[in-house]
Amino acid sequence: PEVRQCSALGKSLKARQADAKAKAETRESLLIDVEAAGDVWEEAEEERLFSKDHASKADTTKATYETLKADLLQEELVLQDLVSRINQDVARYNRLCVKD
């Protein structure tokens, strides 16, 4: 294997691993936000029948919760794809560049 190619691949892997770590941290933060929004929505939902304002608040908090859940799902899919590609490239790097 060419040393430059292995060096470039190694650097690329390190950068993408750092990116994956940052995305995992973002996902974890978003997960906390989703759980909190779910709690707020559940509390608002319990008061839905008290008045039109309460019903409106329940609808608003549910929309916020649903939006955050969708954002979390998107982050999860992006992270899974990134990690999958990194794992494939790590295997390629090990095949091409790592000698026993």
Image: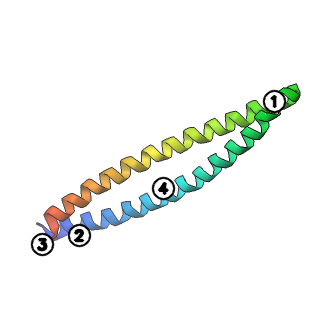
Quadrant of res 96: bottom left
Q: Crowdedness of circle 1 by 10 Å Cα count: few (<14), some, many (20+)? A: some
Residue under label 3, please give it: 99
Task: Give how far apart the Cα atoms at labels 4 and 3 are.
Answer: 31 Å
Q: Which mark is first along the chain, 3 or 4?
A: 4
8 on left or right of 95: right
What kind of element bears circle 1?
Answer: helix
Give me the residue at 30% from left, 67% from top.
11
Give me the residue at 62% from left, 53% from top.
32
Residue under label 1, please give it: 48
Q: Which mark is first along the chain, 4 or 1?
A: 4
Q: Position of residue 16 (x, y in %)?
A: 37, 60
Task: Give how far apart the Cα atoms at labels 4 and 2 are.
Answer: 24 Å
Task: Give how far apart the Cα atoms at labels 2 and 1 are.
Answer: 60 Å
What kind of element bears circle 3?
Answer: loop
Q: Position of residue 5 (x, y in %)?
A: 19, 65
Q: Position of residue 48 (x, y in %)?
A: 81, 29
6 on left or right of 1: right
> In which quadrant of the rendered image does the N terminus lie?
bottom left
Q: Are discs 4 and 2 less than 8 Å apart at CB?
A: no
Q: Which mark is first along the chain, 3 or 1?
A: 1
Residue under label 4, please give it: 23
Q: Is residue 84 above or below residue 58?
A: below
Q: Are discs 4 and 3 less than 8 Å apart at CB?
A: no
Give me the residue at 49% from left, 42% from top.
74
Q: Amino acid at mark 1?
A: Arg
Give me the residue at 31% from left, 63% from top.
13
Task: Give how far apart the Cα atoms at labels 1 and 3 are.
Answer: 65 Å
Mark number, residue 7: 2
Q: Amino acid at mark 3?
A: Lys
Quadrant of res 37: top right
Q: Amino acid at mark 4?
A: Lys
